[in-house]
């Protein structure tokens, strides 16, 4: 496409970068305008916390740009609305409860996965959290992915039974924001 022939660009006195910036801003505005809001008084926030042992394998552990990783045993725990779940080992600074760590892989297990000429690192314990919000909309119950901020907002509102206004993400595929209603 020949941008020199676009009459609105020259008519408005805009350069190519300004036109691109304008179109980009318009696209972002359209995407944000596509976010819906929902009000609900029936909801549950969950955070699945997982501890997993991982070992790095490589011919050169210090300088390999593309090492291979292997995961070993893992344990998980479901947090609900910020309350301490049964079997929780400890709480972190973000208000998430974590399970007891899984058994550390033995040297035999680590070496069994090692390929010819590879070296292995020490096992590292990874911590991951996945957040979801389940809410009722009419007769339908929906569960969508969310983030830590929404999880904590719901955890603070839940004990008081406050209704929430939820801001949904693009195509209503996630919960981006939760605000308690007064």
Image (cartoon, helix red, strand yellow):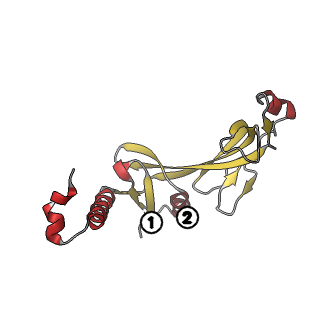
Lower sequence index among marks 2 and 1: 2
Front one among 48 and 6: 6
**Given contact means CB atoms under 8 Å apart, are the residues at marks 2 and 1 in contact?**
yes
Label 2: few (<14), some (14–19) or many (≥20) C-alpha neighbours in 10 Å: some
| Residue 83: image location, x then y, percent | 63, 56
Front one among 112 and 145: 112
Label 1: few (<14), some (14–19) or many (≥20) C-alpha neighbours in 10 Å: some
**Screen quadrant of the C terminus:** bottom left
Front one among 139 and 17: 17
Identify which residue is drawn at 81% across, 33% down: 110
Q: Quadrant of residue 93?
A: bottom right
Mark 2 highlights which residue?
156
Q: Residue furthest right?
A: 107
Mark 1 highlights which residue?
180
* Residue 100 shows in the view: no
Identify which residue is drawn at 70% across, 59% down: 92
Identify the secondary structure beneath mark 2. helix
Identify which residue is drawn at 55% across, 58% down: 148
Please tell me whether residue 61 is drawn above or below residue 11 in the rendered image: above
Please tell me whether residue 125 is drawn above or below residue 73 in the rendered image: below
Number of marks in the image?
2
Front one among 109 and 62: 62
Q: Is residue 123 left or right of residue 182?
A: right
Q: Quadrant of residue 21?
A: bottom left
Q: Which mark is residue 84?
A: none
């Amino acid at each position: 496409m020949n941008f020199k022939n676009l009459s609105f660009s020259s008519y408005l006195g805009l350069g190519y970068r300004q036109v691109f910036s304008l179109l980009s801003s318009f696209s972002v505005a359209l995407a944000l305008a596509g976010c819906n809001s929902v009000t609900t008084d029936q909801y549950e926030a969950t955070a699945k916390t997982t501890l997993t042992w991982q070992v790095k394998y490589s011919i050169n552990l210090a300088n390999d740009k593309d090492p291979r990783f292997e995961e070993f045993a893992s344990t998980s725990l479901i947090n609900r609305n910020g309350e301490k779940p049964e079997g929780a080992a400890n709480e972190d600074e973000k208000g998430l409860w974590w399970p007891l760590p899984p058994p550390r892989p033995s040297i035999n297990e680590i070496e069994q996965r090692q390929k010819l000429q590879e070296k292995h690192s020490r096992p590292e314990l990874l911590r991951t959290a996945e957040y979801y919000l389940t809410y009722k909309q009419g007769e339908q119950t929906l569960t969508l992915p969310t983030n830590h901020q929404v999880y904590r907002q719901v955890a603070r509102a839940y004990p008081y039974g406050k209704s929430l206004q939820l801001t949904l993400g693009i195509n209503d595929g996630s919960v981006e924001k939760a605000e308690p209603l007064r």
